[in-house]
């Protein structure tokens, strides 16, 4: 796959991120977000985890599970839901018995249609509606995060540069540092340092389509150097920053795919 053939458009909504992607092949990676990935036009793609390799039309995968994708010439949507999202738990229920939930063709198309419609008419998508497309019954659970951890992630999210020590956060929520670190990992499934890196990476991605160099973007968002940023990007998204940057700035929308330009309207709606 040539780097220039990879197309990506990012749509961020609160604590969820939609990535509209064509022709993606990733390296092994994992991240703290729950991931929903779907094909847009009844074409399967390959998902590989440490346990299996399978052709799929869509899937939901637990946070922090290593995986890689191979979807040459296929348009896909990735939905990444951060663990502090109040609706994160809804989709996480599908992975309670197995770290990966495989979607049928019909389920994948229903969800794809919903996301594309939401974006093209500038209407916020609802994770509850995504859940209802997959499950007719109402959720019966009492999943909730500790309010102290909710406050901690809110503090982190409010920082223009995600640099703060665990000691400072612990003091703000009136916990010892050791207790905070244990509770944070227990609640979010990732250690504090890893979470900060994920948030910094998201902030860089939001500005990757600018003409600023990767080195300056990495430094501006709190990475120690460009090599540190590159390692984080590859381990978290399975793509090198240079690949992702080129994919984000490409503006040749007529070459998106041969399936009735299925992402044309989305790229047009999100084009800035």
Image (cartoon, rainbow, N blue to C red):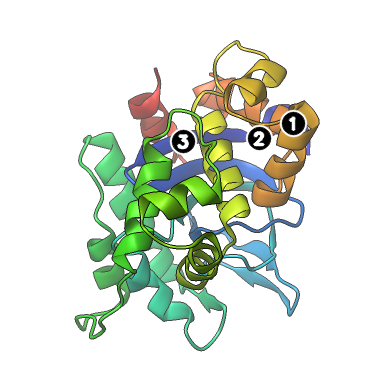
Which dot marks residue 151?
none
Report the residue at 32% width, 72% height from top: 90
Residue nearest the observer in this picture, 233 or 6: 233
For residue 81, side relative to residue 45 (left or right): left
Mark 3 to mark 2: distance in Å?
13 Å
Which residue ends up furthest to the bottom in the rendered image? 97
Res 23 quadrant in image:
top right
> Mark 2 to mark 1: distance in Å?
6 Å
Task: Tell me the element at label 3.
Answer: strand
Of the pair 167 and 238, the residue shown nearer to us: 167
Q: In the displayed structure, does residue 185 sit left or right of residue 122?
A: right
Q: Split into 4 quadrants, where in the image is the C terminus?
A: top left
Q: Residue 154: x percent and y percent?
A: 34, 47
Q: Quadrant of the N terminus?
A: top right
The image position of residue 29, as x and y in percent, is: 70, 56
Residue found 65% across the figure and 48% down from its top: 237
Q: Is residue 221 above or below residue 199?
A: above
In the image, residue 243 lies at what x, y percent? 71, 31
| Nearest to viewer (mark 3 / mark 2) | 3
Residues marked 2 and 1 touching at CB (< 8 Å): yes
Please tell me the numbered disc located at residue 10.
3
């Amino acid at each position: 796959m040539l780097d220039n053939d990879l197309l990506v458009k990012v749509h961020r909504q609160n604590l969820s991120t939609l990535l509209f992607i064509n022709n993606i092949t990733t390296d092994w990676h994992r991240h703290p977000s729950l991931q929903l990935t779907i094909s847009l036009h009844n074409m399967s793609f390959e998902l590989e985890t440490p346990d299996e390799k399978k052709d799929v039309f869509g899937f939901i995968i637990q946070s922090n599970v290593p995986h890689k994708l191979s979807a040459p010439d296929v348009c896909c949507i990735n939905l990444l839901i951060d663990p502090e999202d109040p609706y994160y738990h809804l989709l996480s229920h599908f992975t309670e018995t197995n770290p990966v939930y495989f979607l049928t063709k019909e389920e994948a198309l229903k969800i794809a249609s919903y996301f594309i419609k939401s974006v093209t008419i500038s209407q916020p998508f609802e994770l509850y509606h995504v859940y209802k497309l997959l499950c007719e019954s109402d959720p019966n659970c009492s999943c909730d995060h500790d309010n102290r951890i909710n406050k901690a992630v809110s503090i982190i999210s409010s920082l223009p540069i995600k640099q703060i020590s665990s000691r400072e956060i612990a003091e703000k929520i009136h916990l010892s540092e050791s207790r905070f670190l244990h509770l944070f990992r227990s609640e979010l499934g990732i250690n504090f340092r890893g979470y900060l890196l994920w948030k910094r990476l998201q902030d860089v991605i939001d500005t990757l389509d600018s003409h600023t160099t990767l080195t300056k973007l990495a430094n501006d968002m709190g990475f120690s150097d460009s090599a540190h940023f590159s390692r984080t990007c590859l381990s978290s998204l399975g793509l090198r920053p240079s690949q992702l940057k080129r994919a984000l700035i490409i503006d040749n929308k007529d070459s998106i795919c041969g399936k009735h330009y299925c992402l044309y309207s989305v790229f047009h709606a999100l084009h800035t």
